[in-house]
Structures are given as structure tokens and as C-alpha cells.
Amino acid sequence: MQTLETNRLILRPWRESDLTDFHEYCTDPEVGPNAGWKPHESMEGSRQILSIFLKDESESAVVLKETGKVIGSFGLYCDRLGHKALGSGREIGYVLSHDYWGHGLIPEAVRRVIRFAFDEVGLDYLSISHFPFNGRSKRVIEKCRFRYEKTAQATYRNYRGEMLAEVCYLLTRQDYLENREFYQS
């Protein structure tokens, strides 16, 4: 994904120099499990994952403009939730440092990526999901006006090997066009 800006954030490609910030939020036991992954246990483990992100154009660092600190990650992935009949689409995913929860940063980032996906990339739809226990992510999704689609049972294997349900949502190009002014903020 190309570099995108909001009022408070920059979404940009990852850099090797992001390792310390990346490791800091990835070791937080409140962050990873909400996204289905185990908190990082070592700087070397974070380095290995960051090296994957450096090669993956679907992954972006979420940077706080005010400080230049990386506070999360944002992904625009191939849709794995089964919407091929709708045309071209992507699935959104994000993680934010616990220190920045509750400040409206992820909804701001999601709205910017929605504009990018429909206006610049020309996608037909975006999908997104959360685990039933992740109420914060549910609020982000609802604030960004995705439509509930279904709750898929046992579709995601987390780091403990548990099969988790996913609450799935969709935003089509038509949905976007009907509410375009909302996404401009």
C-alpha cells in the first residue's frame, strides 16, 4: 500500500528502524491476543516478523505524526472471507498499541484506507472481521459503517491452536458512494 496520511497519522511502508517501536507494542499482552497472535517474547522474534513485513506491500506501519512513533500496523490483504462473486476486493486488518486505544485513531485510519481502496485502487468491496470478544474492534467497524454480514464459526486458528469464530462485515463500492461525504473526514 502506498503512503497515506490522515490528520494525525501516516500509514507507510515498514522500515528496519521501526523495530523498537514495533517490539514495544507487540510484547503487550493486551494487543496480540485481540488479533489472534501471541505477544512477542524477544526482540529477535520481532525482528523476524518485521523482516516479513518489510517485504509485504500489504502491511503498513501506523505512525503518529506528532511524534514519528510507530504505534500500530495496518493491512490491506487478499480477501480470505469468500466474496469473489462481488468482484475485486480486499480485507482490512489492524493492530494498535494499547497506549493509544480510545483516541479514535484506527477509525481515522480505516476511513482513509476506505477512500484509497475505492477512489484510487477501484475496488468493488472491502471486508473486515473481529473476534466476538473484541468489542473495541467491533466499535471501529461499526463507526466506519461496515454492514454486518455473518458470524463464521471456527474459521481462525489462533496461536494457542483454538478455533475462533469471526464476526464478518462488508462495505461495497455502492455503500461507499452513498456515504462518500462521511469518509472524507
Image (spheres, rainbow, N blue to C red):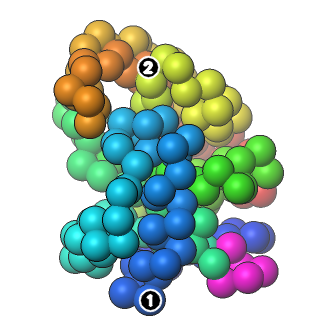
Q: Give the residue displayed 44% in from the left and 19% down from the top.
A: 167
Which three-letter amino acid code belongs to the residue tagged 2? Val
Return the x and y of residue 139 as percentages of the image width and height.
Answer: 67, 30
Quadrant of the image for the C terminus? Answer: bottom right
Q: Mark 2 points at which residue?
A: 167
Using the image, determine if residue 158 lies above or below residue 92: above
Q: In this view, does 16 lie to the left or right of 173?
A: left
- Give the crowd class for mark 2: few <14, some 14-19, many >=20 residues within 10 Å: some
Q: Name the residue under label 1.
A: 17
Given residues 23 and 60, the one toward you in this image is 23
Instruction: Please tell me in which quadrant of the rendered image residue 70 appears.
Output: bottom right
Q: Give the residue displayed 63% in from the left and 78% down from the top.
A: 69
Span shown in magenta: 64-68
Return the x and y of residue 110 as percentages of the image width and height.
Answer: 58, 51
Q: How far apart are marks 2 and 1 (CA)?
A: 35 Å
What kind of element bears circle 2?
strand
